[in-house]
Amino acid sequence: MENDKVKGQTARTKLRSDAEEQAGTKTGELHPPDNDLEMKRFVHELEVHQIELEMQNDELRHSQEELELSRNTYEELYDFAPVGFFTFDSSGNIQDVNLAGALLLGIERGLLFMKPFSSFIGDAEGRMIFSDHLALIAQRKVMIRCEITLTGEGGAVLDVQLQSIAKEKISDKSAYVCSTVFDITHRKRVEKELQKAHDELELKVELRTEELRKANGQLSGEIAERKRAEESLQVAYGEIKQLKDRLQAENLYLQQEVDQRYNFGEIIGQSPLLSRVFSQVEQVAPMNATVLLLGETGTGKGVVARTIHSRSTRKSRPLITVNCTTLPASLVESELFGRERGAFTGSDARQIGRFELADGGTIFLDEIGEMPLELQCKLLRVIQDGEFERLGSPRTIKTDVRIIAATNRNLTEEVKNGKFREDLYYRLNVFPITMPPLRHRQEDIPLLVNHFVAKYNKKTGRKIESVSKETLSSLEEYHWPGNVRELESVIERAIITSQGSVLQVLDRFDVPRKPEAFGEGDVKALIELEKDHILQVLKKTGWRIEGKTGAAGLLGLNASTLRARMRKYGIVRG
């Protein structure tokens, strides 16, 4: 609005000047009016023109007063504004400054005229920023901001923000810069404090995060370790419980074994047949091979089984004996493989089977020929796969046992008659050992008699010191259908009944006589008949002993038994 008034006043001044100039040039050309009428009209026009001039003067005076009022108002606003206003020339010299700007620098207003503004900038970088700021304003003709640091009177340091724009003077078209200077010292300090607090907080957060990460990793490791420990404890608890049950069962079994007497002591003898048995035991004992003991009742198959186990790598583990003839048929399976509680009527507790007890050791299946046919399949599975299930349980149990089986039956005939599984027979007959009957090793009888006399002297407290030749001859001549077990019983009874220090065997009580129908000639005839029959079969098979077409198979004998008979009868290939 003020600019419009100034422009109007200027236009009227110019118009007046032009009018005066024209009036001056035409003064000489003016002629006085010719008559009174023209004079009056001329005077009237002058009066009107004078009135117009007076009115214009009044208007101009009024406008000047308003302009002065506006100028005073502007100057008050300019001087007492809360921010500093500076006017710079193109070189950055101060042309004008308000009171706020002078107070900002701490210098009297009149002393700042044409003073370089860069002299108040405390650092070279700030002076470079201000110089670039002026150049950029002159180039772009837009409002531009920058931030610098000023050093006021007394060394006071101020952070300020310049907001500048380029202008031009109307008179000479020269450029100048109008800048608004804001004191941002407090803001900068707060920003620095905030940034410092932010950095410290970030550092604390980072450190705490790292601590939490480490703690979390440690906690995760502890949790994993705890889980592993719990799993190990569960496994250990299960193993301990299993071992506890097994040890209890083993303890019970061993107590039962201790309470029982062995059928007879260590095998005593030095006959060739018994020496062959010892050689076979030495061969097979260190191995884990299945052993099948063949021979009549009382020949010492149980003692040989214990000897094999004691010389094996499993001697630190138990030898579990199962006599298949003493177990009721209905309980054989539960005794061998165990049962769960409630598996059948009357089973009010869980029972660990003999195979589970023998895990890592040896199981001796005595009189295997008496095992029911329906259980032979399950036994075959244990031998082949090493696994079974308890009665009443679907869980498969793994076991590692060595099997030693014994029988007084001819298993070949049992297989032919359908009473014994052929595949089970082949699995058991890996390493057969035939125990010779006592009648085939008569030279061992004196040694056995001395052994049993010493044994029962200690047991009964008697002092039998000798055995007469007649007694020994009587014992050697006897057929001994009960083998060593029968001889032991006879000696025990003779020690009880003998008077004095000499063993006395009463024929009619102690040594049953051979049937009267068989004389010495008859017995020899039977021996010769057996010898001739073996020779005929050997010649028929081309002296082949083993195999399906061998003489042992045709005679229904074990190959080792046939070889023993051949040595006994002196049969050799011519």
Image: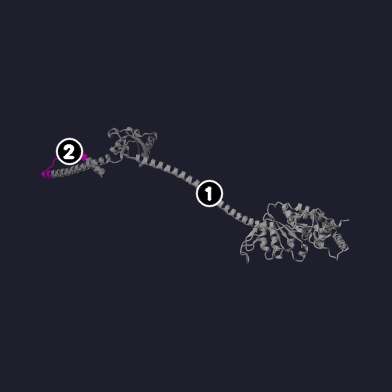
How many marks the image carries: the answer is: 2
Camera-nearest residue between 239 and 208:
239
Q: Residue at (52%, 47%) from the top-left corner?
A: 218
Position above or below: 122 against 11: above
Of the numbered discs 1 and 2, the one sitting upstream in the chain is 2
**Magenta stretch: includes residue 34:** yes
Q: Residue furthest left?
A: 36
Residue occupied by mark 2: 27
| Residue 201 location (% of width, % of height) | 42, 43
Front residue of 160 and 43: 160
Q: How is the image coloured?
A: one colour
Percent across and percent down for residue 480 are 81, 60
In the rendered structure, the answer to whether residue 166 lies left or right of residue 366 reads left
**For the magenta stretch, what is the residue range?**
16-40
Q: CA distance from mark 1 to mark 2?
A: 120 Å
The verdict on residue 453 being magenta is: no
Q: Which residue is mark 1?
A: 222
Name the amino acid type tagged 2. Thr
Q: Secondary structure at mark 2?
A: helix
Where residue 232 appears, x then y in whole percent?
Answer: 58, 52
Q: Where is residue 436 drawn, in percent x and y? A: 80, 58
Magenta portion: prevailing SS class: helix
In the picture, residue 415 is in which quadrant?
Answer: bottom right
Q: Secondary structure at mark 1?
A: helix
The amino acid marked with disc number 1 is Glu
Q: Nearer the viewer, residue 157 or 475?
A: 475
Quadrant position of the C terminus in the picture: bottom right
